Image: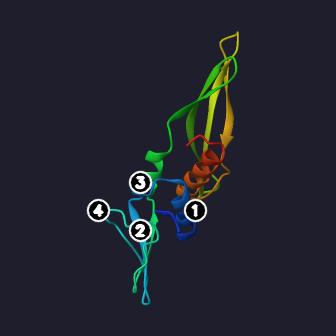
Amino acid sequence: MTVIKNYTDIEQSKILAKILPLESADMCFGINDDTLKYNNLPWLIPYYKYTAKEFYVPCWSLAKLMILLPSKFTEKGKYSETTYNIDIRKYALNENTDLYQIAYGNYKWYEDGNYSWKDMINTGEKENLIDVCYDMIIKLNEQNIL
């Protein structure tokens, strides 16, 4: 059975903290000698703020990552521009497991009125939606789309 993640893990958070505006984080991990915990904070703790007792790592909830992903983006070519729309997919792997994937693409229309979807960029399929959101943010950043 799939365990649903509600926020980025520490490793994902450390990478996203280098890509996304820190004020976009809506949660954080607080690490001290006794426990590893997260806190839902009304304000953002500065990136990797270190005090004598605690070390904070900002993290992002699934809801926040979904907001940060653009609904569409446009690439301008030499002679034209193309708009790519988001496509969020959920597949049943088996009775107990779903897979998720996110893609950006567009429709190609044919003279007979039919059309097909063409992915321009997509993530692999994973069991957690937050993991594909993370993957897509990395891919968009690598292509200077974010």
Query: Decide: marks 2, 1 in contact (CB < 8 A)?
Result: no
- Residue 126: percent from left, percent from top: 63, 56
Task: Name the residue type under label 4.
Answer: Pro
Residue that mark 3 sits on = 24
Disc ID at residue 15:
1
Q: Is residue 50 above or below residue 17?
A: below
Dot placed on the residue nearer the N-terminal end, 2 or 4: 2
- Residue 59: percent from left, percent from top: 46, 64
**Secondary structure category for the residue under label 2:** strand
Quarter of the view holding residue 108: top right
Task: Name the residue type under label 1.
Answer: Ile
97 or 79: nearer the viewer: 79
Residue that mark 4 sits on = 42
71 or 113: nearer the viewer: 71
> In the rendered view, does 145 fall on the left or right side of 50?
right
Query: Decide: marks 1, 3 in contact (CB < 8 A)?
Result: no
